[in-house]
Amino acid sequence: MRQIGIFPHLGKPKAIELAHTTKAYLTERGVKSWVTPKVCQALGWAKDNSTVVAEKPQNVGAVIVLGGDGTILHGAGFLAPYGVPLLGVNLGHLGFLTEVEPKDLESAVIKLLHGDFTIEKRMLLEAAVEDGKEKQRFFAVNDIVITRAAFARMVHVAIDIEGVAAGDFLADGLIVSTPTGSTAYSLSAGGPIVHPRLQTILITPICPHSLATRSILVPPEDELRIRIIDDRKADVLLTADGRPGAELKSAESIVVQRAKRCAHFIKLGERSFYEVLRNRLDYPSLHPPGKV
């Protein structure tokens, strides 16, 4: 690799410190560092023989993302259209999407340069808001969420899957997530844990006003059409990976399906998904009963 990107969380001092350290590791080994103009300015770098400054990651072999899961989501969404893989360095709380800890950064860079890694593809979701005139499109690594703007107000949602009515219920909202997002908001709402290599779409109601309404997993090629039933005046919002998306009206429908693009995560083979469950979430079934 002749160019490797550096994508830090600019609000974290530790991420800024590690960005300088990462650049030093790369420069020592004759590899150029790619950064966006915003990152370059924030770090006080100059465009020179060791630094490539550009909006798009052209000719970049990989990007090292320094931050927590939110930074990884932002980086994965940004890089997905270009097919550039990312390596996540954990500077957050859970670090579910990251691959290495800061103390292992130098060894991770060496493995990266030697090609000692694999790439894991993660499916993305695409949501299109249709109002009869135009479409607004949103992409998500984790989830598409529909909720009321007003506090503690329910939303009436109807769901069609492949043209067949599959649900009509009142709830605080609805989460449509990827397997990657199964350990995020969907998990907090009672959804199942799904291995990120599986291909499926999760539909999880948020606090449904019914004992029978539960999560459902559907094939990745199925198309979901979500309709908002106009029985309340409070605004309904769509968010993608926690980012503000669109205000929804009753005349609109939201079509959610697997995106044609995907995110590429670099795996160094040092930990499995089940280790992450044990270490990050203290998954109870991994502890023998009767033992502390």
Image (cartoon, grey):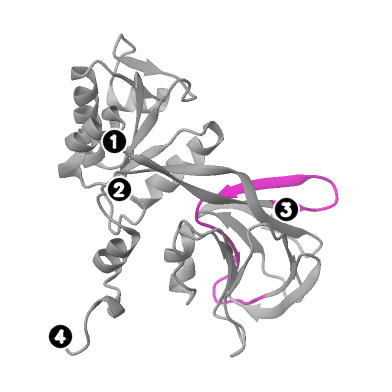
Mark 4 or 1: in front is: 1
Q: Quadrant of the C terminus?
A: bottom left
- Of the numbered discs in the image, which one, if any, rests on residue 99? 2
Give the mark, 4 or 2, whose residue is nearer the N terminus: 2
Q: Is residue 233 above or below residue 211?
A: above
- SS under mark 2: loop
In the image, is 162 to the left or to the right of 67? Answer: right
Quadrant of the image occupied by residue 152:
bottom right
Q: Position of residue 290 (x, y in %)?
A: 18, 90
- SS under mark 1: loop
Q: Which residue type does callout 2 highlight? A: Glu
Q: Pointer 3: what residue? A: 129
Q: Is residue 25 above or below residue 116?
A: above
Q: Which residue type does callout 3 highlight? A: Val
Q: Which range of residues does the magenta coloring cover?
A: 128-155
- In front: 99, or 268? 268
- Of the numbered discs in the image, which one, if any, rests on residue 291? 4
Residue under the image location 25 percent in, 46 percent down: 100
